[in-house]
Image: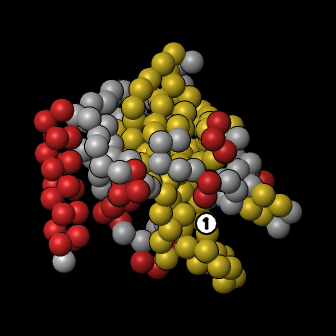
Amino acid sequence: MTVIVVLMVLIVSGLVVERITGVPVLPSGLTAGLRPPPRKFPVLAASQPVSVRSQAIQLDAPVHNVGLAQDGTIAAPSAERAQEAGWYDQGPTPGQYGPAVIVGHVDTRTGPAVFHNLVRLRPGDRVEVDRQDGTVAIFEVNSTKSFDKAQLPVAEVYEDFSRPNLRLITCGGRWVGGTTGYADNLIVFASLVATRPA
């Protein structure tokens, strides 16, 4: 019991020091896997994405527009464009307030597709999106989560308009076939941290 009390005192003291000084003092083991969005961030005017890159997973792919499928979900790129990503063109563009959504296949019948390595992105990794206006929107990964397609938390994924966000979405989990394919959606949550000229 004494050990637990001492540990709690240390954690609370650490949080107070961090709040006053801005210097993180908690052990990394207590904060591993978490990367909160930055407090300060740029905001960009609307401009369509043309490509998406991440050195962390050797991703470098063109981006084209996608809309809604007949069932009301975001349409995936066609099989012929499986090495390209699709930006949902009825939502924000990357850099605007809100979640810009870019989707892509994890694989095809013939092999890996554009987002095959998406599962390897970790908090702190960078994702860059080139835009038509010549700017590059630079996002930092906050988290990577997997959800059952039938129980997707719509508000968490699509309704955060507090800052410029990015959602990279692909399939994951077990293969169930039919019109569902994989049982889950793998979603990367990222926040805009910087911009630069292309």
Give the amino acid at mark 1.
Cys
For the C terminus, the quadrant is top right
Residue assigned mark 1: 171
Q: Residue at x 18, y 32 (%)?
A: 21
Above or below, 103 relative to 198: below
Query: Between residues 24 and 99, which one lies in front from this camera angle?
Result: 24
Report crowding for label 1: few under 14, some 14 to 19, many 20 or more residues within 10 A (C-alpha).
many
**Where in the figure is residue 117, as x and y percent of width and height?**
68, 54
Residue 83, given in percent of the width and then of the height, sits at: 74, 48
- Establish if 76 lies above or below 135: below
Q: Tell me, what colour scheme is on the image? A: secondary structure
Instruction: State left or right for residue 47 relative to residue 61.
Output: left
* x, y percent for residue 145: 47, 63
- Camera-side residue of 15 and 191: 15
Residue 151 location (% of width, % of height): 42, 77
Residue plotted at (61% across, 66% down)? 171
Please report the residue visible at 44 percent of the width from the left and 23 percent of the height from the top.
Answer: 195
When asked about the image quadrant of residue 113, the answer is: bottom right
Residue 76 appears in the picture as rendered:
yes
Q: Residue furthest top?
A: 197
User: Callout 1: helix, strand or loop?
Assistant: strand
Q: Is residue 85 above or below residue 71?
A: above
